[in-house]
Image: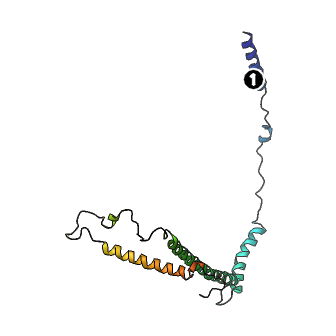
Amino acid sequence: MQTTQRTALRAARRVRPQAQQQPRRFESHSSHGAHESHLAPANESFGAGFYIALAAVPVSIAAYRFTRPGAEQPYFTRYITEKYNDLAGKWAERNDTHTQAMEQAAADRVLFQNEASRSNRVVDLKYPEQFNGGSPWNVPAGHGSTNIDKVIAKYQEENYTENEKRFQQLRENKVPREQPFEPLGKSSST
């Protein structure tokens, strides 16, 4: 029972000082009793800042009209236009050079890819029937399966001639990718 009493006493001590203190009020009723007449409203102006801002608008418009050149564009506009026109030409030249280099790299990669191990190059398809794949419905008579032997022969011939051209470049040591690089500034194309 003693532990319960101690706990109750502790709780009562904590609560008691808070309950006994009244909040102090700083207002009094004596100052509000008379309701004397109020002061006259003050005569306030807009201030100097308002008038300066108001005068700045027509002054700015007049200054803009008088300082503007005739048919010629403003200096900053001309500077930006010239700067970006020059950059556009440089970017176009760089993009063209990059595109040519990527095309040449792709051609060279195909040249050396698996050529030593294969004597007869075949264009691999996931499945050859994909040429004949199609809807079995609404196919007119005689248009079902097509003979693609001529197509295969054509592409094999193109592939063979392209490979011969690349081998000839290798034999003559004229692989375009191995030729000296021409810097952007000294390009003969411009």
Please identify the quadrant where the C terminus is shown.
bottom right
> Residue reaching furthest left?
141
Say which quarter of the image contains residue 68.
bottom right
Q: Is residue 72 left or right of residue 161?
A: right
Q: Which residue is mark 1?
A: 15
Which percent across, then down, holds residue 18?
77, 26
- Label 1 crowd bin: few (<14), some (14–19), many (20+), radius 10 Å: few
Of all residues shown, which one is farthest toward the bottom? 71
**Front position in the image: 177 or 68:** 177
Q: Is residue 28 above or below residue 79?
A: above
Give the secondary structure at mark 1. Answer: helix
Residue that protrudes farthest toward the top in the picture = 1
Q: Up-down: is 73 above or below 53?
A: below
148 versus 136 height, above or below: below
Residue 178 in percent (x, y) is at 60, 78
Residue at image coords 61%, 88%: 188
**Coloring applied to the structure:** rainbow
Which residue occupies 68% across, 88% down? 69
Indicate the position of residue 154 as horizontal and vertical percent values: 36, 77
Residue 10 falls in which quadrant of the image?
Answer: top right
Q: Nearer the viewer, residue 67 or 89?
A: 89
Say which quadrant the N terminus sits in: top right
The x, y position of residue 148, in whole percent, is: 30, 72
Residue placed at 43% from the left, 79% from the top?
161
In the depicted view, which residue is nearer to us: 10 or 84? 84
In the figure, is residue 167 to the left or right of 67? Answer: left
- 84 relative to 112 in the view: left or right: right
Amino acid type for the residue under numbered disc 1: Val
Q: How many marks?
A: 1
